[in-house]
Image: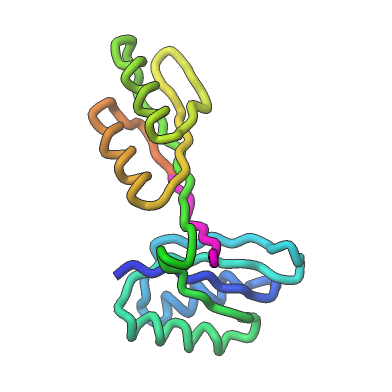
Amino acid sequence: MRHILSILTKNETGVISRVSNLFSGRGYSIESITASTTLDKEHSKITIVTTGDEKVIEQITKQLHRLIPIIKITEMKPDNSICHELMFVKIKVKDDDRAEIIKLIELFGAKILNISQREYIIQAVGDENHIKSLIELLKPIGIKEIICSGAVAIGRQ
């Protein structure tokens, strides 16, 4: 099962390295990891997408709390958070596909960042299913390159 962990840490050198080493040392997988400072420059927020059952997540959480700079760990669930990814995708474009591509991009709330005679670079933001659906619809058109950020999540009340 997929889990998203939001980790508030002290903003210290090597924190991400310690967190990722904990995962690799214990054989836990990381699907994605993102990090940035918060409004308080003394703290950072790390978002990790991982897989495992509830017991594995409990072990990860306990072991992360043992790391000195960890302040708080929150599991982000659909009912208590908003989670999105950013995707850039470069697609082949033929003259007869342009109208269909533009409709598809509008339907998904995506943007064209760059246009040339033979390709578009598209930006899309959304949850995992939104991004996967857009990718599946773009495959028949011809994806040349794709890059996705890791998930970022914020809690809601």
- Image coordinates of residue 136 in percent, x first then y, are 26, 38
Q: Residue at x 42, y 75 (%)?
A: 24
Q: Residue at x 64, y 75 (%)?
A: 9
Judging depth in this view, the residue of 46 and 101 nearest the camera is 101
Q: Residue at x 32, y 45 (%)?
A: 132
User: In the visual, does 41 lie left or right of 157?
Assistant: right
Magenta range = 148-157
Residue 71 highlighted magenta (yes or no): no
107 up-or-down from 99: above or below: below
Quadrant for residue 43, please give it. bottom right
- Image coordinates of residue 22 in percent, x first then y, are 48, 79
82 up-or-down from 63: above or below: above
Judging depth in this view, the residue of 18 and 40 nearest the camera is 40
Q: Residue at x 52, y 65 (%)?
A: 47
- Image coordinates of residue 56 in percent, x first then y, are 35, 82
Residue 149 highlighted magenta (yes or no): yes
Residue lying at the far left in this picture: please name it.
140
